[in-house]
Amino acid sequence: MSQIPPPPPGQPAPTGGSGAVGSNKNLYTILAWALLPPIGSLIFLFVGKDDPDVKYNAAQALVIHGGAFIVWLILWVLTIIVLPLVFLLLLWDVVWFAIWVVGLIMALQAQGGRVNFPVLGPLAASYVPMVEGWAK
């Protein structure tokens, strides 16, 4: 009597497959907008360099928050020179906070997809490919 070997066991279920990548993609998109702008955006530009959507979102957040930071620095220097301009610095802080909140909400709604930031998004679009090239 010949014995037939048992069939090979089925493939084990993937433990860190595309589901984990999708959740990381969503997390990376949110953190690119939320975590210490523009430093967090720069970090996730390099962390998410293998995913074009994460890289695009991080580059767009870096351009928008980087521009806001430059405006803040200019206003800060002007405030040191001309003290009555301190209200402009405070006003810009409120505007930058609003930009941050809108970006965070849109990143939450995008669920890992590309964020289409209103008004500033099209202005930043010409710089995004250049910034994306930094992470190659």
Image (spheres, rainbow, N blue to C red):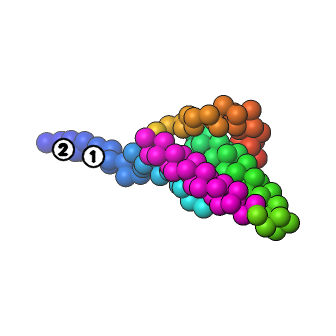
The answer to whether residue 48 shows anywhere in this view is no
Q: Nearer the viewer, residue 115 or 118?
A: 118
Q: Nearer the viewer, residue 28 or 110?
A: 110
Q: Crowding near pointer 1: few (<14 within 10 Å), some, many (20+)?
A: few
Work out whether mark 1 precedes mark 2 in sequence or the reverse, and give the earlier one: 2
Q: Magenta stretch? A: 85-109
The mark lying in front, picked from 1 and 2, is 1
Say which residue appears at 71% left-offset and 42% top-offset: 132
Outermost residue to the left: 1
Say which residue appears at 83% left-offset and 64% top-offset: 82
Which secondary structure type mostly characterizes the magenta part of the structure? helix
Q: Which residue is mark 2?
A: 3
From the viewer's perspective, is 48 left or right of 82? left
Give the amino acid at mark 2.
Gln
Residue 24 higher or lower than 4, as above or below: below
Residue 83 higher or lower than 38, as above or below: below
Outermost residue to the front: 84
From the viewer's perspective, is 34 left or right of 8? right
Q: What is the x, y in percent for residue 15? A: 37, 52
Say which residue appears at 54% left-offset and 55% top-offset: 34
Q: Which residue is mark 1?
A: 9
Q: Is residue 67 magenta?
A: no
